[in-house]
Image (tube, rainbow, N blue to C red):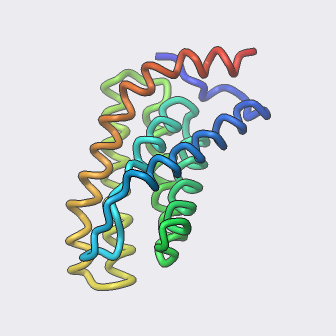
Amino acid sequence: MSNLVGVKFNTRTIAMLGMLIALNVVISIFFHIPIPMTHGYINLCDAGIFIAALIFGWRGGAIVGGASGLLLDLLLGYPQYMFFSLLVHGLEGWLAGYLGAGKTQGRQVAAIGTAVVIMVAGYFISDSLMYTMATGLVGVATNLVQAVVGGVLAFPIVAGIQPLIKKQTSL
């Protein structure tokens, strides 16, 4: 399976990552569900992170993950999560890209599964530090649903847009 891991980060690639961050933030703002028990929300951010990671590799996944998470929390009124999201979603994107970009579909599923576990654990830790361990435990199920839905949405989108993006970056 081809990818853009070896592509240098030129102006065009950086612009595409910026557009993916913006699209990810806008879609996630319109499709988010507040979860009062966790002081957070469910959104579609993980789909965009996994798309970036599987197409652009670990650098793209980390950049889109960290920036999207931070901006979403800032814009949706959850500033207490901004820096946790920068780290947790950045690590999620990095891991998914490092383990899954350019690999077989089975390896990509395993990479996303590993990244999901890291994201859920990261928010369990952040919720437990900011609030209580009970809050962290409540968030496990909602974060798991959010990440799995993101992974399921990412696969067909990557299959559809990867050839187009590869064509654009090879110009």
154 or 23, which is in the foreground? Answer: 23
Q: Looking at the picture, how far across and down is residue 154, in whole percent? A: 39, 34
Looking at the image, the residue that sits furthest to the front is 30
Residue 10 position, x and y percent, is 78, 32
Q: Residue at x 35, y 43 (%)?
A: 150
Seen from the viewer's position, the closer of residues 69 and 26 is 26
As drawn, which residue projects farthest toward the right?
A: 11
**Relative to 26, is 71 above or below?**
below
Q: Residue at x 34, y 35 (%)?
A: 153
Query: Where does the image place residue 81, in percent across and percent down from the top left?
Result: 47, 72
Q: Position of residue 78 (x, y in %)?
A: 46, 73
* Figure check: 105 above or below 33: above
Tell me what residue is drawn at x 61 percent, y 42 percent: 59
- In the displayed structure image, the side of residue 113 where residue 54 appears, left or right: right
Query: Looking at the rendering, which quadrant does residue 6 occupy?
Result: top right
Residue that appears at 52% across and 51% down: 25
In the figure, 56 relative to 40: above or below? above
Q: Is residue 130 above or below residue 15?
A: below
- Count of numbered circles on the image: 0
Q: Quadrant of residue 168?
A: top right
* Viewport quadrant of the C terminus: top right
Left or right of 22: which side holds 137? left
